Image: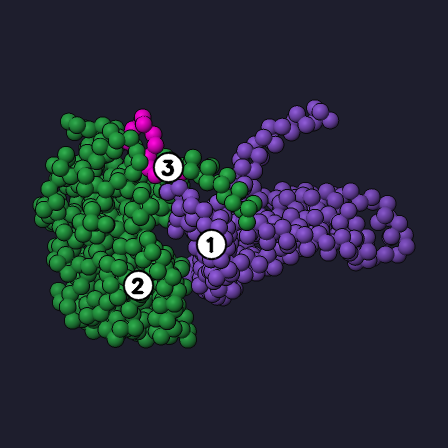
Chain colours: A green, B purple
Amino acid sequence: MRAARCLAALALVGAAACSGTGASPTEGPLRLQVAGEPEETKVYGAIVEAFRRSPDGFEIDLVEVPEKDEHLAKLTTSFAGGDAPEIFLINYREYAQFVVRGAIEPYEGFLETNGVELDAYFPQPLEAFTFDGRLQCMPQNISSLVVYFNEKLFRQAGLDPPQPGWTWEDLRQTARTLTKGEVDGLGIEPSIIRLAPFVWSNGGEIVDDPDTPSRFTLDDPAAREALEYIVSLVRDDKVVPSEQEITAQDLETRFVTGKLGMFLSSRRDTPVLREVLGLEWDVAALPVAEEPAGILHSDAYCLAAGGDAERTAQAARFIAFATGRQGQTIAALGGRTVPSLREVARSGAFLDPTQSPAHPEVFLQGIPAIRRTPVIATWPEIEDLAEEILTRAFYEEGYTIDDAIAALEAETQPLFEEAAER
Amino acid sequence: MKKTGLLALPFVVGLAALVGLPAVAALGLAFTEFSGVEGPRFTGSANVSRLVADTAFWRSLGNTLIYIVLAVPLRMVAALGAALLLNRRSRTASAGRPLAYLPTVVPDVAYALLWLWLLNPLYGPLAAIFGTADLLVDPWGARVSLALLSVFQIGEAFVVALAVRRSIPPHLYEAAAVDGAGPWFALSRLTLPLMTPVLGLLTLRDVILSLQVNFVPAFLLTDGGPRYATTYLPLYVYRTAFRYFRLGYASTIALTMFIITAVIVLVQYRLARRWRLTP
């Protein structure tokens, strides 16, 4: 044990020297790190450019990372190396692990100096990015889960577009009608964020306490019924692409190539779908069981903690621009986001009738029923575990709903406990 | 001697700075809680206790050992087979030698992406040839697929085996032929026994290599799935460190990997010594 202590002491000195809690550079352009497809990230380039041209603007380097996992890995290593980007964009389901480790400078302290009026924003993402009673990051969007559908396949099947308030049974029948030959009716990923709105719509809960959860509650009858419904679409109705089909071609690609009638996703697919020539598509609200329910998809601009005070203040000024009227308008025109600033969300920049989808108001109409998943440090790991278990529930012969519920409870329990300890 | 030492100095300095020091630091970090974001905190043997109870670690270790059992024999047979076949002095063999080495120089990412297409469950040629869409969907299908794709990247083992084969004096074969020995006798009683010491070393090296080289295909082709079947230790270390911010615990796993590698190599070396397979 003495040897271990000596080695640990050596490592502590080395690691402490290397690990900063934030951005260390004191010169050069500020950096903004974002993740996404080129179609998604080009809008941030436009915002950065508009900011540079603004009266108080300055140069900002945009660091684009293609995948979310690499985005997080790059953030971790850059924080560990004391070279974190001054600003980074992150989803509310993933930022808590940075907050509890002191990596984020709360944005709340910069609201007044930058003239940010929180009343002008939708409250749900602000609440999601509030941790320990303080607004940590400034949300740029408030997307929710919707049903993307292929209008041509609907016409060919003699179906009318889904109407607001359509039911789970309507979804089942529509998917059955669309499923023919190479075409599957519905694309839904085996993940907790796809399942959750169905559970909520059925009057159930996914965890025992949304603020300080200690366990999943999918054994609750209403939650279990929602899980059974989703799994029955896969196993009994066979309207969802098989595991082989999904491995061969993801849902978006299947939708774009006319092999999928509907799929569930947030606003993030819109820019890519707009690029596809000849694809006729629109969006509809999620089907309803007992009451409408949606799930929040929101990213926010965060400030790295521990950096030079002046540079952090400059970074905060950029965030105010990006989440202000001009920045939000540029983002809305790019198609990627449902603006978190109410005024822009209700403007022509977002509700542009010349652009697909033809019914963008669906994203706004769902906002009152939007809920969020728990904001805890271990949530990303819990989601990963849940995805693996739900994949088995979807596709593995002999793996029952009870097996899935028991596995979720057992495998995620230590992670809920770990989060509670922090 | 002094001059040789000086020539080796840049390499030794680089090795010490870029491999030695981080390795020592990782060794120390194995006994801390360290997220990379905040400073490390000494936690004694807490990470070891966690490791013992971590089913994901044991599953990854099992997957890694399965990979070694599947991949190493295949790779060694392929390297030896290619060396023996392409040893001849003919135009075909001359053309075949660079071809045998070629997959090794293809960047790992490009190689993995090529296989992603080859193994595509619906549109890949291998799915059509074998008549199954389960190559990357079934856990064992994925395990075997990842082992198979490693078989083509045997360039270094092939070159060494070829060099050893060529170092066997031709007069030994001539003498065997005079005594009426056929090709099988020459292979089993002459070629293989003379090559065995080096093949033993190549096997040792391949086991060490196989503990590490599976990261890229597992990351890009299967993402550790299906059902965690291809979550090998390197991928588990990566996720633990960089997705879940547990660099301290990831260092414990890496240290354990190092110990496991050392034990496997030691056991192999002892066996080889007992059977007089190594020089």
Nearest the camera: B227 or B90?
Answer: B227
Give the residue type that dot 3 points to: Gly
Q: Could you tell me which secondary element the residue under label 3 belongs to?
A: loop
Q: Please name the residue that numbered disc 1 is placed on.
A: B46
Q: Which of marks 3 and 1 is in front?
A: 1
What stretch of residues is rendered in magenta?
A19-32
Q: Where is residue B1 in the image (x, y as percent from the top left)?
A: 73, 26
Residue at horizontal 57%, vertical 59%?
Answer: B65
Residue closest to the far top: B3
Q: Could you tell me which secondary element the residue under label 2 belongs to?
A: loop
Q: Please name the residue that numbered disc 3 is placed on.
A: A20
- Disc 2 sits on a residue from what chain? A
- Disc 1 sits on a residue from what chain? B
* Horizontal arrangement in the rendering, residue A248 relative to residue A348 (left or right): right
Give the residue type that dot 2 points to: Ser
Which label was assigned to residue B19?
Answer: none
Q: Where is residue B66 in the image (x, y as percent from the top left)?
A: 57, 60
Give the residue type that dot 1 points to: Ala
A27 within the magenta span: yes
Q: Are there few (<14), some (14-19), or many (20+) residues within 10 Å of tag 2?
A: many
* Horizontal arrangement in the rendering, residue B173 relative to residue A397 (left or right): right
Q: Is the magenta stretch mostly helix, strand or loop?
A: loop
Q: Where is residue A133 in the image (x, y as percent from the top left)?
A: 20, 49
Nearest the camera: A259 or B272?
Answer: B272
Marks 1/2: CA distance? Answer: 23 Å
Residue A391 in view (yes/no): no
Which label was assigned to residue A214?
Answer: 2
Q: Do the residues labelled 1 and 2 touch (CB within 8 Å)?
A: no
